[in-house]
Image: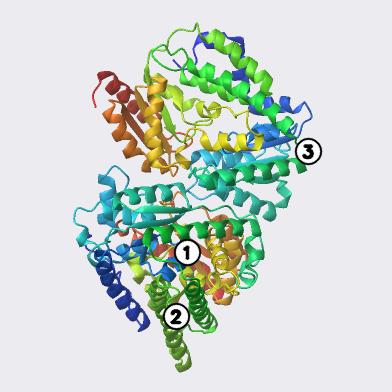
């Protein structure tokens, strides 16, 4: 276990849905172990891969980056990253994508989160960055799994206000060439999975899954909108991140829909009853970047002293805007392709990212933005200059935190608190008064 | 070592070195022909097509001076090499000289730079950035999907360039360009052969100067210069130093090689475009040109940015044997360190062959601590000579 913390890392829980999703997640994971022991296939996938296919084929899977989040939340990052170093790699780069590989090097894997990560039999990776592909190669070998790599090409169509096109006019948004290609990739992936697992893809089930996804994400959209227009906000990000991430993992199932609905209803009830998350809310903050899973309490740190509440992260934001695709029935595989060949662009490609952050900051009545730039990701390039400039030109001051979002050992609480306080005291409060 | 008097006395070498040291002037001279320039950033821009169109392919080299634009616009994840390339586009060094700029999918960072430049064009039209294009070859997986994709990508690029030059590019035009480039690469390979083995006649810094210098001449002239140089270099004195293969961040200047040479090491090959990788394999003249071009880029020796660990762990030892290297140096700029994921496997294979490796990490431009680097190079040279593992 890691060294004793000098600051509180556990957030205060206000809602019931996150408790339900956490409990289910843990139980599902225990069940997973049994399924794998009984010889079922087990997928390990990147966050940018179309999990809906595995869901519809009833192939259980774990998501790489979300596994990192779990390791981080359980304060196990440092243990794993040291294993990487001992094996001749480094303990300070690519932490966000290498936790699972590090787990495979653990001489006592059962001490990992929830009894450790069972060995996947299948890896599905979408080409993202060189290091990511290499890490996946190492994992494939370490787990003795078989891998399918989805090729991915660049976005050559640049459109303003992508969110106005993504639900209905996704062909126009993504462009024919790119979507044709990705659709073909998905067809190959399905054949690969059918052959390797003996499970078949029932198209009716896929359509049902995709319709469930639309329903689930529509609840997220309603929740996001409700939070956006309610001042003071009914919930903050610590109430929503886990509930959203865990249910997104099971996206497309009825359980996923139920959890999204339950989150919405809980938030709605708080709004109806006029119960705010931070009663003295004076400042609304937006967080850009990967979640600070090992220190969710950080998001609550500024509530008492300044009435400053973090009310937005990409987790609920992308769920609300990034996934919904109508007209599923016509060609379900194509609609899914349109989702995944664009998903990463939302965060990483200008001006999709900058325009969206500005829109979200406006709609959510944000006063300031905290932008976590991962220090140890060589693929980090969202044109943050442009994001910061766009936000500041639109009247939203931004503070940048450079940190490792997965490894708690490298977190400097004092400096990070000081940076956010500086933003609040010198750039937000003077504007408001 | 460094650049020796035998090289300095060679006319061909002097000309090549002039271009290496004065890229802007050399490019201006090439532009006297009146041809439109197509600048290439990344290892995998099909130069053959540009040449066939009667346009002037120009290899973008980074800017080695203050880099205020890179500091302003790029995140810290962009290592020193990438910062130099970006600066060279944004500052005044080549102002008014770029008609078109083509980037290739040779690294994740180039793709990012492509998006950034597109956006900068929108944000700051007063900059007058050139027309920007991207060649998205699939290079990691070399399966049929990648091959098919790359052929169609080549055809699309041909169509794009036809639009730029305003006329059709025929298979005959492409075949001619392929022939010219094959000649040039063949000459470069013959020159590089003098770097290899116990009888190595050329130092790494001489080699990089000549190879990179030749990029900044018209191809026929470059071929001739390299051929002349090769004839002369055959009788240069042998280089007495520990022979190493260089991998890691691209070196566009001779600075790091010279430091290595001063410490008793000599780079006899590198798997980098600014070096031996440029000349790796011909474009097959016997198959239809678009397919031949696509095949060449996918089959060249694997770069760390676009190849699997396993492929690299197979290639590096082979290459070491081929060139008679005694060690491998991997030198990485800060945040240009994806090589780290390749390294342990390579190190293990090489160890079995009795080949030693040196890994240098976290480097910047300008170099922060040359003395420390020299010390590490010298100690590596001693270890290799001592035969200890
Ligand atoms: S460079 Fe970044 S995205 Fe790529 S593997 Fe490393 S942490 Fe992940
Ligand atoms: S979307 Fe970005 S942060 Fe998320 S997995 Fe992909 S590269 Fe990583």
Pointer 2 residue Cβ closer than 8 Å to ligand 2: no
Mark 1 neighbour density, 10 Å: few (under 14) some (14–19) many (20 or more)? many
Residue A199: percent from left, percent from top: 39, 66
Look at mark 1 in the image and give the residue it sits on. Answer: A50
State the CA–CA distance, disc 2 to disc 1: 18 Å
Q: Is disc 3 placed on a helix, strand or loop?
A: loop
Mark 3 neighbour density, 10 Å: few (under 14) some (14–19) many (20 or more)? some
Q: Are marks 3 and 2 in contact (CB under 8 Å)?
A: no
Instruction: Specify the quadrant of the image occupied by residue B157.
Output: top right
Q: Is disc 2 placed on a helix, strand or loop?
A: helix
Look at mark 2 in the image and give the residue it sits on. Answer: A257
Residue A213: percent from left, percent from top: 49, 75
Look at mark 3 in the image and give the residue it sits on. Answer: B168
Q: Are marks 3 and 2 on the same chain?
A: no
Mark 2 neighbour density, 10 Å: few (under 14) some (14–19) many (20 or more)? many
State the CA–CA distance, disc 3 to disc 2: 56 Å
Quarter placement of the N terminus of chain A: bottom left
Residue B321 tag number = none
Residue shown at the point (55%, 63%) measured from the top left: A337
**Closer to us: B247 or B206:** B247
Residue B227: percent from left, percent from top: 60, 14
């Amino acid at each position: 276990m890691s060294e004793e913390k000098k600051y509180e890392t556990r957030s205060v829980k206000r809602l019931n849905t996150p408790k339900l999703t956490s409990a289910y997640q843990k139980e599902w994971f225990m069940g997973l172990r049994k399924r794998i022991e009984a010889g079922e296939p087990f997928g390990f996938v990147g966050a940018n891969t179309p999990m809906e296919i595995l869901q519809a084929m009833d192939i259980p899977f774990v998501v790489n980056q979300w596994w990192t989040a779990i390791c981080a939340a359980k304060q196990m990052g440092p243990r794993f990253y040291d294993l990487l170093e001992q094996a001749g790699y480094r303990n300070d780069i690519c932490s966000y994508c290498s936790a699972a590989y590090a787990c495979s090097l653990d001489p006592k894997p059962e001490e990992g989160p929830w009894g450790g990560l069972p060995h996947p039999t299948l890896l599905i990776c979408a080409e993202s960055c060189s290091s990511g592909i290499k890490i996946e190669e190492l994992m494939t070998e370490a787990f003795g799994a078989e891998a399918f790599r989805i090729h991915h090409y660049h976005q050559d169509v640049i459109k303003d206000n992508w969110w106005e096109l993504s639900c209905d006019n996704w062909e126009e948004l993504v462009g024919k060439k790119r979507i044709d290609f990705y659709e073909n990739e998905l067809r190959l992936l399905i054949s690969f999975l059918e052959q390797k697992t003996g499970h078949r893809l029932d198209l009716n089930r896929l359509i049902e899954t995709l319709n469930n996804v639309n329903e689930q994400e529509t609840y997220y959209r309603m929740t996001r909108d409700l939070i956006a227009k309610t001042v003071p906000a009914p919930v903050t990000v610590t109430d929503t991140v886990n509930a959203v991430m865990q249910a997104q993992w099971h996206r497309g199932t009825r359980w996923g829909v139920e959890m999204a609905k339950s989150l919405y209803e809980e938030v709605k009830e708080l709004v109806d009853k006029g119960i705010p998350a931070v009663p003295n809310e004076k400042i609304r903050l937006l967080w850009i970047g990967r979640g600070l899973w090992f220190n969710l309490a950080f998001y609550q740190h500024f509530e008492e002293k300044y009435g400053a509440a973090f009310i937005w992260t990409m987790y609920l934001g992308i769920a609300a805007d990034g996934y919904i695709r109508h007209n599923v029935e016509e060609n379900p595989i194509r609609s899914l392709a349109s989702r995944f060949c664009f998903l990463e662009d939302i965060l990483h490609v200008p001006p999709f990212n900058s325009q969206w952050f500005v829109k979200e900051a406006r709609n959510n009545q944000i006063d300031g933005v905290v932008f976590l730039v991962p220090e140890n990701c060589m693929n980090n390039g969202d044109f943050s200059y442009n994001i910061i400039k766009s936000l500041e030109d639109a009247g939203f001051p931004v503070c940048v935190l450079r940190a490792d979002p997965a490894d708690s050992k490298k977190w400097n609480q004092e400096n990070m608190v000081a940076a956010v306080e500086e933003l609040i005291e010198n750039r937000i409060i003077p504007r408001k008064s | 070592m460094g650049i020796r008097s035998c090289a300095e006395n060679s006319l061909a070498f002097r000309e090549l070195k002039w271009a290496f040291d004065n890229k802007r002037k050399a490019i201006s001279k090439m532009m006297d022909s009146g041809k439109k320039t197509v600048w290439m950033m990344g290892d995998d821009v099909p130069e053959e097509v540009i040449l066939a169109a009667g346009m002037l392919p120009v290899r973008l080299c980074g800017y080695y001076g203050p880099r205020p634009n890179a500091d302003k616009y790029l995140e810290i994840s962009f290592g020193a090499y990438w910062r130099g390339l970006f600066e060279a586009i944004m500052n005044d060094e080549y102002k008014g000289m770029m008609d078109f700029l083509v980037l290739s999918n040779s690294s994740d960072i180039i793709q990012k730079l492509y998006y950034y430049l597109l956006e900068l064009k929108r944000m700051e039209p007063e900059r007058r950035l050139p027309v920007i294009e991207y060649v998205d070859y699939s290079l990691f997986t070399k399966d049929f999907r990648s091959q098919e994709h790359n052929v169609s990508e080549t055809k699309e690029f041909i169509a794009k360039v036809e639009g730029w030059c305003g006329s059709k590019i025929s298979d005959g035009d492409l075949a001619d360009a392929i022939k010219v480039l094959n000649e040039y690469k063949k000459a470069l390979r013959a020159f590089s052969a003098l770097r290899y083995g116990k009888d190595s006649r050329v130092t790494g810094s001489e080699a990089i100067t000549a190879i990179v210098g030749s990029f900044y001449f018209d191809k026929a002239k470059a071929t001739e210069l390299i051929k002349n140089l090769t004839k002369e270099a055959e009788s240069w004195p042998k280089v007495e130093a520990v022979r190493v293969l260089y991998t890691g961040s691209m070196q566009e200047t001779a600075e790091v090689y010279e430091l290595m040479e001063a410490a008793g090491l000599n780079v006899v090959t590198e798997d980098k475009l600014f070096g031996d990788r440029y000349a790796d394999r011909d474009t097959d003249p016997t198959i239809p040109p678009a397919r031949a071009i696509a095949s060449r880029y996918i089959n060249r020796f694997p770069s760390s940015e676009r190849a699997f660990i396993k492929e690299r762990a197979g290639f590096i030892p082979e290459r070491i044997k081929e060139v008679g290297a005694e060690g491998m140096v991997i030198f990485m700029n800060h945040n240009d360190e994806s090589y780290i994921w390749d390294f342990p496997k390579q190190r293990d294979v090489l160890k079995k062959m009795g080949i030693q490796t040196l890994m240098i990490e976290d480097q910047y431009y300008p170099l922060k601590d040359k003395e420390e680097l020299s010390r590490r190079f010298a100690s590596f040279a001693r270890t290799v000579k001592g035969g200890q593992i």
